[in-house]
Amino acid sequence: MTVKEEYIYYAPRNISPEEAERIAIERAKINAIANAFGTIVSQNNSTFIASGNGKSQVEFFSLGGSEVKGEWIETIGIPRCITSFEKGMLVVKAIVEGRIREIISAPLDFKAKVLCNGTEDKFEQDEFKDGDDLYLSFQSPVDGYLAVYLLDNNRRAYCLLPYRNNTEGRVCVKCNIAYVFFSSKHVPAVEASLVDEYTLTCDRSNGELNQIFIIFSPNLFTKALDNDTDSLLPRELDYEDFQKWLVNCRKRDKEMRVETKYITIKNNNGE
C-alpha cells in the first residue's frame, strides 16, 4: 500500500534541528501505518487518540514498530521538512510518502543493542564522541541470518556486518546465543583476524547523526552489492542502492525484520 502523510512536531529546546527533523519524519511514518492498519494498545502504553475523518493521532508517541499493526517498507523520494518558529519554539512539518505492509502474524522479536566503549549491555548508548569504539550485542529466539549497515550524513551506506573478509556474504546466528560483534575478543582465536573493529570519527563542528540498520531473517539472504574502499573503512554503496536492495529483500521475505538505531557522533570539543 502506498501512503502519504504529514506530521507537525513541536521540538523541545534541548533537541537539535537535525534531530527534530528525524523525529518528525519517524512520527509521520508511524501515523501513516496507524491510519492504515490501526494499533495494538496495552494498558501501560501511551494514549492513542482517534480524531475525525478516519484519521488517527498518537499522543506522546511511545508507540514502537511492534505496537503498530504494520511496518514501513520503502520511502518514495526524499522526505520534506518545513521548519518554522512559534513563540521561540522550533516547529517541523514533515511530509513523507512510502509503501507500508500490514503485519498479520506476530513479528519476530530479536534483541540488539548498540554499545559504546564496552561489550556488555550496560554500555548501550546512542551518543558517541570522536574516537569512541562501537560494538553490537545481538540475540535471537530462532536461527537465522544477520547483516548490519551504517548510513552516514553523506548518504553512504557502509556494510559493518558481514565483515570485509567474509566471502560468503552472510552471517549465520544461532538461537538464544548472546553475540557481541565488532570485537575480536568475542570469537574463537582462529577467527579473530577476520573481525573488523570500528572506531567512530567526526570532524563536523556540529556533530553527525548516523543510522544503523540491523537486518535479520530466519531465511537465507546475502548482503547488498557493495564496493571496497580503503583498508580503514568498510565496504560501501550509495544509500539509494542500499534502499533498493533492502526493499527487494523485504518484498520477497515477509519474515525479515529491520531495526534502525540512531546515533549521534560529536567531535572532541563536544559541540
Image (spheres, rainbow, N blue to C red):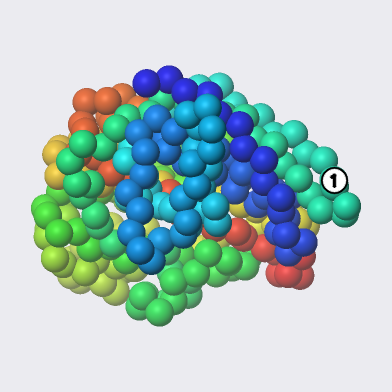
Tell me the quadrant of the picture where the N terminus can be found.
top left
Residue marked by disc 1: 85
Residue 232 seen in the current view: no
10 Å neighbourhood of mark 1: few (<14), some, or many (≥20)? few
Quarter in which the C terminus is drawn: bottom right
In percent of width and height, residue 34 lies at 42, 38
Nearer to me, 100 or 117:
100
Is 188 left, or right, of 241 in this rendering? Answer: left
In the rendered image of this protein, does residue 117 appear above or below residue 65? below
Residue 73 left/right relative to 50: left
Q: Residue furthest right?
A: 87
Specify the quadrant of the image occupied by residue 186: bottom left
Regarding mark 1 in the picture, which secondary structure is present there?
A: strand
Q: Is residue 110 left or right of residue 154?
A: left
Q: Residue at x 38, y 66 (%)?
A: 44
Residue 106 in percent (x, y) is at 19, 46
Q: Picture coordinates of residue 181 (x, y %)?
A: 31, 63
